[in-house]
Amino acid sequence: MPAQPNILWIVTTQWRAQATGYAGDANARTPWLDGLASEALDYTQAVTPHPLGPQARAALLTGRLGPDNGVQGYWDPLPVSARTVAHALHDRGYVTGWFGKWHLAERDRSAPLVGEAHARMIVPPERRGGFECWEGFESGFLLNDPWLHGTRLAQPRQFKGYQADVLAQRAAAWCREQADHRVAGGRPYFCVLSLEAPHPPYHAPAPHVAEVGPAALKLRGNVPTGGPVERQAREELAGYYAHIEATDRALGRLIAEVDLAGTIVVFTSVHGDMHGSHGLFRKAWPHEESVRVPLLVRGHPAGPVGRKDGSPVSLADLPHMAVAWAEGRAWHCRRDSALISMPAPTEIPLQCPVAWRGFRSPRHKLVLNAEGAPWFYFDLERDPLERQNLAADPARAAEIAELAKLL
């Protein structure tokens, strides 16, 4: 590994930690990610600090939690003054590039969240987080035929094809270009590939992938069966896993087309999706299906390949990891838990409608409601599916009170 490795982040949306072949999900067809995992450090206890898009992305870019990073609610833009990982790596000699979904600009609350108008919204240069090359879109959830604008595209332009394919191809071309420049004495690169899939709409066409019949899917053990929750979960998961397969193929082409020797590759997601677990859907909930995310690091300088690490890492750690790698240092998690929260309630249907805060370790999860009272307390070692809420157990009151001091 060179003193300053190239760094590539692959960031997806709504891809929960449990939904990969390498994590043991029988529904997930992810051969390329399974191969990446065999060569990577797999952080098996990774979480998002805030399981909703803008808040998670702000923490991912700044290494600071909300609202301290300037983003508290869903509609808050990342402040122009915010210092991001792009600034930090530029200061350390890197050329920086962003490709894909941003979701951190100023938005019109009256405009539809889904559709072309949102996808074509201009993100001005001062709101692009300090990236030298920025090519993307605010949001819009167009999993096919995306609209892109940015450094090299002054006005939004529509690109035909599956969004993950289009973005992976353009990011790959940029990475190859920067690698050629480096051979000629140029700078190392830091690239972020930010994808919306496998976010809804779950039944948007996924190229060359046939949805598995809902009845054939294996559900998590905490999904209520025999009623409308099971029916909705199965119907949505059929499309969800199709987009997982299609996105895995897109990432496979990027991995195959770019010489990643001397490059640290990160794969993760900004949050998960409940998909019927505990009778709930979507995200912003404090449950495992919402807060747990995949996190692979290939080329990690700290140890052998194909290793699992149970440290309680958070997406907010990634900027600090990247700075350490840029400085030729290994990064190690020195905490025994990670903070998780929704700093503000959200009014978007199906998402958790209340604010909460808590912490998660590989053993315990404690969540307090907005008034500071215990809402959830789980023993994750004995109860990984979170079927028994111990928050009101008198025998646990002293234990909970002591742990709550950490918050």
Image (spheres, rainbow, N blue to C red):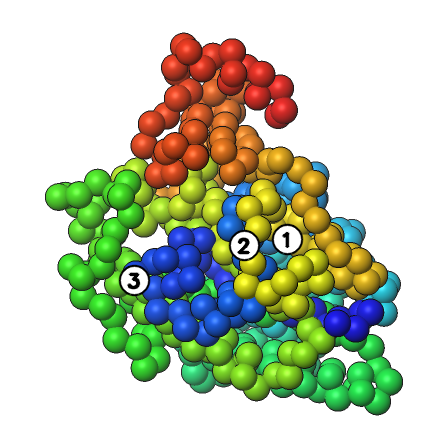
Q: Residue drawn 42% across and 20% down?
A: 391
Q: Can the viewer see residue 157?
A: no
The amino acid type, in three-letter code, at marker 3 is: Asn
Answer with left or right where residue 220 lies relative to residue 158: left
Seen in the picture, residue 121 relative to 79 is either above or below; the reply is: below
- Count how many numbered circles sit on residues in the image: 3
Where, quadrant-wise, is the N terminus in this rendering? Answer: bottom right
Is there a contact, CB below 8 Å, between mark 1 and mark 2?
no
What numbered label is drawn on residue 27?
3
Label 3 sits on a secondary structure element that is loop
Seen in the picture, residue 316 relative to 144 is either above or below; the reply is: above
Q: Residue drawn 66% across and 37% down?
A: 335
Q: Residues within 10 Å of mark 1 (few under 14, many from 20)?
A: many
Where, quadrant-wise, is the C terminus in this rendering? Answer: top right
Tell me which corner region of the image, top left, top right, bottom left or bottom right, holds residue 157.
bottom right
Seen in the picture, residue 407 relative to 143 is either above or below; the reply is: above
Q: Residues within 10 Å of mark 2 (few under 14, many from 20)?
A: some
Residue placed most toward the observer, 127 or 176: 176
Q: Residues within 10 Å of mark 3 (few under 14, many from 20)?
A: many
Answer with left or right where residue 31 lies relative to residue 82: left
Question: Could you say where residue 390 lies in the image, as x and y percent from the top left?
Answer: 39, 21
Tell me which corner region of the image, top left, top right, bottom left or bottom right, holds residue 89.
bottom right
Mark 1 against mark 3, which lies toward the viewer? 3
Q: Earlier in the sequence, mark 3 or mark 2?
A: 3
Q: Earlier in the sequence, mark 1 or mark 2?
A: 1
Q: Residue drawn 51% across and 11% down?
A: 398
Q: Residue drawn 39% across and 32% down?
A: 382
* Residue under numbered circle 2: 308
Answer with left or right where residue 337 lies relative to residue 1: left
What numbered label is drawn on residue 60?
1
Q: Can the viewer see residue 5?
A: yes
